[in-house]
Amino acid sequence: MKWTQIDEKRLLNRSFILGIFGILCCLIPIIYFNFNLKTMPYGGFLNGLGLGAQLLGLSLAVLVLRKRKIDTVIKEKSKKMVLVLSVALLFFILVQ
């Protein structure tokens, strides 16, 4: 099944899950460095995984926005998701 044939609500749900997973993966190395815990050997890997998950979630939310004939409620949720994920992505890129 193609990504364009999946229901909008399902795509937004996947976008939300990927966004939360990406934000949590990016937060873990920052918490380790700020609280002076032991060095984290795979901090860069977690950060890259988190940024990739956020990019994938952002692309899914944009895919929902580009669909035709969608409900206005879903369109507004998708706009909010794009805004939140883009700000989070910019923040985590600038922090590293």
Image (cartoon, helix red, strand yellow):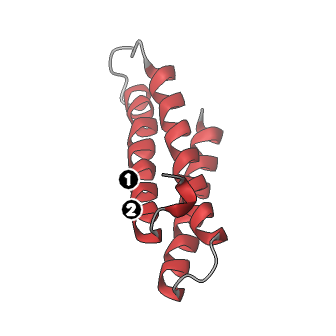
Question: Residue 72 sits in which quadrant?
Answer: bottom right
Up-down: is 25 above or below 54? above
Label 1 element class: helix
Residue sitting farthest toward the bottom = 72
Amino acid at the residue labelled 1 = Ile
Question: Residue 22 sits in which quadrant?
Answer: top left
Question: Residue 39 sits in which quadrant?
Answer: top left
**Rendered location of residue 20, percent (x, y):** 39, 51
Say which mark, if any, is on residue 13: 2
- Please tell me which residue is depicted at 42% across the width and 31% down the height of the picture: 34
Find out whether the residues at labels 2 and 1 contact each other: C-beta distance under 8 Å: yes
Nearer-the-camera pick, 70 or 1: 1
Which residue was labeled with disc 1?
A: 17
Nearer-the-camera pick, 31 or 57: 57
Mark 2 is surrounded, within 10 Å at the Cα level, by few (under 14), some (14 to 19) or many (20 or more) other residues, namely some
Residue sitting farthest toward the front = 1
Amino acid at the residue labelled 2 = Asn
Label 2 element class: helix
Up-down: is 86 above or below 26? below
**Rendered location of residue 3, percent (x, y):** 54, 54
- Please tell me which residue is depicted at 37% across the width and 23% down the height of the picture: 36
